[in-house]
Amino acid sequence: MSDPIAEPADPGQEGTDPTPTAEQGPTGESEAAAETLAELEEDAAEDGTGETEPYDAVVLVSFGGPEAPDEVMPFLRRVTRGRGIPDERLEEVAEHYLAFGGKSPINDQNRALLAALGEEFTRRGISTPLLWGNRNSEPFLTDTLRSAAGEGMTTFLAITTSAYSSYSSCRQYREDIAESIGELTEEGTPVRVDKIRQYWNHPGFASTNARLVSEAARQVRDRTGVVPHLVFVTHSIPDGMDDTSGPGDGEGNVYSAQHQALTQAITDEARATLGEDVVGELTYCSRSGPPTQPWLEPDVNDRLRELAAEGITQVVLAPIGFVSDHMEVIFDLDTEAQETAAEVGIEVLRVPTVGVDPQFVSGLVDLVVERAAQARDESPLRPAWPVAEPWPSVCAPGCCPNLRVAKPAACGAD
């Protein structure tokens, strides 16, 4: 079997900053010229920071994960609180984490993303503080906001590590943000938190995935002479949650529709890039819940078995539903799906998640600047691909409802 994770695209395509730097200028500058350059750089920095007004800080809001074996069960209890799931069931899930030393990779990946965002902020002359708060593990969002408020910060912009629209991938984040706001308000420290729009079809996310998938498909084609079958993967959710995803007055099924649209668009890009008849399809992973409850299908493992029976031997596995290589990726795809593929005789090349790809990171900063401009009552350009309509920055009433219990949600019109 080949390397189970595809190498990123040709670095010559990304990461080259065309902006001249001081090191690129002529040597022997006069003192006056150096002072002028310093003044220009200072002005640029001030201009860059102004792009994030009115926000005092930008906070990365993520799911969180355990970092030691003794944190696994408390983490799982927090994730499933209010659902009545017994510890016996949680212990089965805990084995996934314990198989990797009891540590989820997600927190280290968040640290890497924060560092990359900081570098992009610096490149653009933005000095707005970058913070980090998790929903289910330290550092907890409420603690992060409380600490920042103690330093005089009261207005925040959230970047969530989830690109699509459903209860679990959007509104639940908004509920947790509202809970943090409520706790701090009760303590006498009111804060405001907005968020960037869901970015499944922002070019920073979508085009990065398209590039990574197309390059992986090219690698397989050039190495084997076989055009690979593209299998896109995202997190499964209950059918009922998908049926109600999207605005309250909409038709629903927004979650699956967003994934299907991106699947088709990336397949078309790969077809054009390779000049070959490339076929792609969407599958799901990480199903949980009782067997009687229908969830989105097909499961990636079931589909790999079917593809093998159809004579497919080369597959590019693309986790477009995920921002980074956290537990669902390294266990469900790099472990289970790879084992399934080996059993049925399929060779799989797994595409990297967008992670800290410079194009993705730059796109997130673009989204920060876009949302800040909206908060200033400006009308910034809002690029979108695929589908020309970007998701709103303020969710519509009834969007992606909580089907168990009604809870307040921030960053929305309801």
Image (cartoon, grey):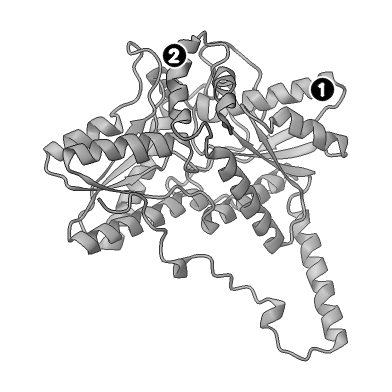
**Residue in view at x 82 percent, y 74 percent:** 38
Earlier-in-chain disc, 2 versus 1: 2
Which is nearer the eye, 78 or 87? 87
Mark on residue 185?
1
Note whether 121 is above or below 200 in the view shown.
below
Distance Cα–Cα, label 2 vs label 1: 36 Å
Which is nearer the eye, 218 or 282? 218
Q: Residues within 10 Å of mark 2 (few under 14, many from 20)?
A: few
* Quadrant in the picture for residue 194: top right
What amino acid is labelled 1 in the image?
Thr
Mark on residue 205?
none
Give the total number of marks visible in the rendering.
2
The secondary element bearing badge 2 is classed as helix
Please tell me whether mark 2 or mark 1 is closer to you in this view.
2
The reply to whether residue 260 is visible in this rendering is no
**Residue in view at x 66 percent, y 58 percent:** 119
The reply to whether residue 78 is visible in this rendering is yes
Asked if the residue under mark 1 is in contact with the one under mark 2, i.e. CB atoms within 8 Å, the reply is no
Q: Position of residue 393 (x, y in %)?
A: 61, 38
Side of 193 where 296 appears, left or right: left
The secondary element bearing badge 1 is classed as helix
Side of 287 where 361 appears, left or right: right
Note whether 350 is above or below 148 in the view shown.
below
Q: On the image, numbered disc 2 is attached to which residue?
A: 89
Q: Residues within 10 Å of mark 1 (few under 14, many from 20)?
A: few
* Quadrant in the picture for residue 134: top right
**Residue in view at x 29 percent, y 56 percent:** 217
Quadrant placement of the C terminus: top right
What amino acid is labelled 2 in the image?
Arg
**Residue in view at x 84 percent, y 34 percent:** 149
Q: Position of residue 15 (x, y in %)?
A: 53, 65
